[in-house]
Image (cartoon, rainbow, N blue to C red):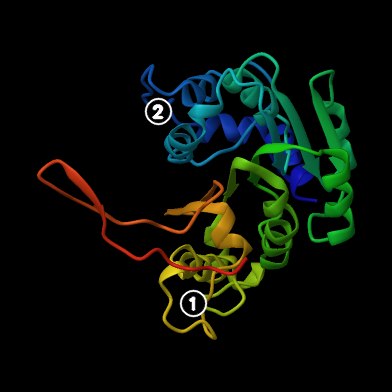
Amino acid sequence: MLGQVIRDLIGGAGKKAEQVKSPMPAVGNDNPLAEYFYRNPGPGACKWHHYFEIYHRHLQKYRMQSPVVVEIGISMGGSLPMWHHYFGPGTRVVGVDIDPACRQFEDSATTVMIGDQADRNFLAALREKVPRIDVLIDDGGHTMVQQIATFEELYPHVDSNGTYICEDVHTSLWPNFGGGYRRSGTFLEYSKGLVDKLSAWHSRDPAALTVDAFTLMTFGVSFYDSVVVIEKRSMEPPAQFMVRDSVVYRADTGPTVKT
């Protein structure tokens, strides 16, 4: 179990870890997530440094808004209080892990669910238990089956103005996780296919590409090193306008879409 392996490595090899630890990276006051992480007062956590800029860019709009945050992959438990600190009072955090030992991180503001994210029945149970999700962060097992199943089962369930983040997408390049460079069936290639759907309004070949549920509920897809961020928003057919001499004209005929 990945979470237990990490805990064993940190706890059982403390002396070795001390020998190779690096100085804290310089962080400014403009990213409270990085500030909290590198001064972590509680359980252990492990994150790639550049993730904090990505998080803050896409998630700062939820701060002090009492969001419901689901994080798949708890490991050492340190990210759970980090989300509470970042999003502020009233935040509800739901942590998901396959390792039963992670139940220890549950408290009055944090729910822990134990299950396999590749199990679609478990994901259906999660939908039942968590009727609203504002932010979903997939930092789980990172296999192709897990990432794709989680997206397909939970992305439609995320709030209409929510944000879905899949981390460690570099495993799409690793054969032992089911990946490989441009290999069909990886989460990275799967995600690239979603990009076409954003512009499906303009397709001239409806047999190959047409507006679907993803088009209607998605504002954008952002790719970063090892991270894919998908932002939800209820979308309408795009409209093009022209302005001349302070008069606004409709420059397109308005796509007709069957929904």
* Position in image of residue 33 (x %, y %): 51, 25
Numbered label tally: 2
Mark 1 lies on a secondary structure that is: loop
- Mark 1 and mark 2 lie on one chain; the one further toward the N terminus is 2
User: In the picture, residue 53 is in which quadrant?
Assistant: top left
Specify whether 29 is left or right of 140. left
- Crowding at label 1, few (<14), some or many (≥20) Cα neighbours within 10 Å? few
What numbered label is drawn on residue 182? 1
Q: Is residue 24 visible?
A: yes
At x 50%, y 67%, the residue is 197
User: In the picture, residue 90 is in which quadrant?
Assistant: top right
Specify whether 59 is left or right of 177. left
* Position in image of residue 133 (x %, y %): 71, 38
In the foreground, 123 or 47:
123
Q: Amino acid at mark 2?
A: Pro
- Crowding at label 2, few (<14), some or many (≥20) Cα neighbours within 10 Å? few
At x 68%, y 57%, the residue is 151
In the foreground, 220 or 28:
220
At x 54%, y 53%, the residue is 218
Q: Residue under circle 2? A: 25
Vertical comparison of 98 with 70: above or below: below
- Asked if disc 1 and disc 2 are in contact, CB closer than 8 Å, the reply is no
The label nearer to you, 1 versus 2, is 1
Q: Amino acid at mark 1?
A: Arg
In the foreground, 201 or 255:
255
* Position in image of residue 234 (x %, y %): 56, 48
